[in-house]
């Protein structure tokens, strides 16, 4: 199993650090694509939540999310977006491919329709049973990564 994580304009350096930690914990993450305003790994604040995980997971910063997604598309890797929408499927009811790229979007704006329509093979979501519409992006990433890898061993 191979997982590629695309962080589409994540504004909080602490969320990015938490995602690195979860990626290391869940395993199977090949690379984290840090896109747009998402912090590069040389940000000193990143270490407060990453606690060394930036050394464990390969990453690269891209000026735009589209640039990263085109690279992933060229590799033939299916791209799934984590987004709330009428076409989104419950993340626990998906049969995940052996290699996958997953996009996590901006904390308030999510992933743009343009990116979803042009690059995404599937939209998935975590069902919310309370009053809020979504989880914090780092918490969402943890749940998704552990679901994808649940039957990997």
Image (spheres, rainbow, N blue to C red):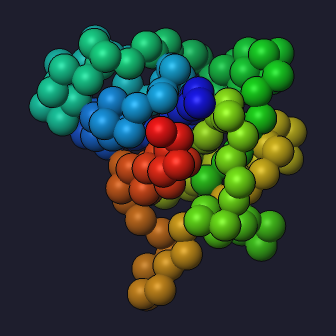
Q: Report whether residue 85 is seen.
A: yes
Residue 63 lies left or right of residue 42; in this view the side is: right
Q: Residue drawn at (42%, 87%), measured in percent from left and top?
A: 130
The answer to which image quadrant residue 100 occupies is top right
Place of residue 41 in the rendered image (x, y in percent of width and height, measured from the top left): 32, 16
Residue 151 lies left or right of residue 118; in this view the side is: left
Place of residue 61 in the rendered image (x, y in percent of width and height, measured from the top left): 49, 15
Residue 145 lies left or right of residue 72; in this view the side is: left
> Is 97 located above or below residue 31 in the figure?
below
> Is 107 located above or below residue 87 in the figure?
above
Q: Quadrant of the N terminus?
A: top right
Q: Report whether residue 107 is seen.
A: no
The answer to which image quadrant residue 121 occupies is top right
Residue 87 lies left or right of residue 142; in this view the side is: right
Q: 121 or 97, which is in the foreground? A: 97
Total residue callouts: 0
Q: 28 or 9, which is in the foreground? A: 28
Place of residue 8 in the rendered image (x, y in percent of width and height, measured from the top left): 56, 36
Q: 84 or 27, which is in the foreground? A: 27
> Is 120 located above or below residue 84 in the figure?
above
Q: Residue drawn at (43%, 13%), measured in percent from left and top?
A: 58
> Is 122 located above or below residue 9 in the figure?
below
Q: Residue drawn at (38%, 18%), measured in percent from left and top?
A: 57
Place of residue 82 in the rendered image (x, y in percent of width and height, measured from the top left): 61, 53
Q: Residue drawn at (79%, 43%), measured in percent from left and top?
A: 120
**Outermost residue to the right:** 118
């Amino acid at each position: 199993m191979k997982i590629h994580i695309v962080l589409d304009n994540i504004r909080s350096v602490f969320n990015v650090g938490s995602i690195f930690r979860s990626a290391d914990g869940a395993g199977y993450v090949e690379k984290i694509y840090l896109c747009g305003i998402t912090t590069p790994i040389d940000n000193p604040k990143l270490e407060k939540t990453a606690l060394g995980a930036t050394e464990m997971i390969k990453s690269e910063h891209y000026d735009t999310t589209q640039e990263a997604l085109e690279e992933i598309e060229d590799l033939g890797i299916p791209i799934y977006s984590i987004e709330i929408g009428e076409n989104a499927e419950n993340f626990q009811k998906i049969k995940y491919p052996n290699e996958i790229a997953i996009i996590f979007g901006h904390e308030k704006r999510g992933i743009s329709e343009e990116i979803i329509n042009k690059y995404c093979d599937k939209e998935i979501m975590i069902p919310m049973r309370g009053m809020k519409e979504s989880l914090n992006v780092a918490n969402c990433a943890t749940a998704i990564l552990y679901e994808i890898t649940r039957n990997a061993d």
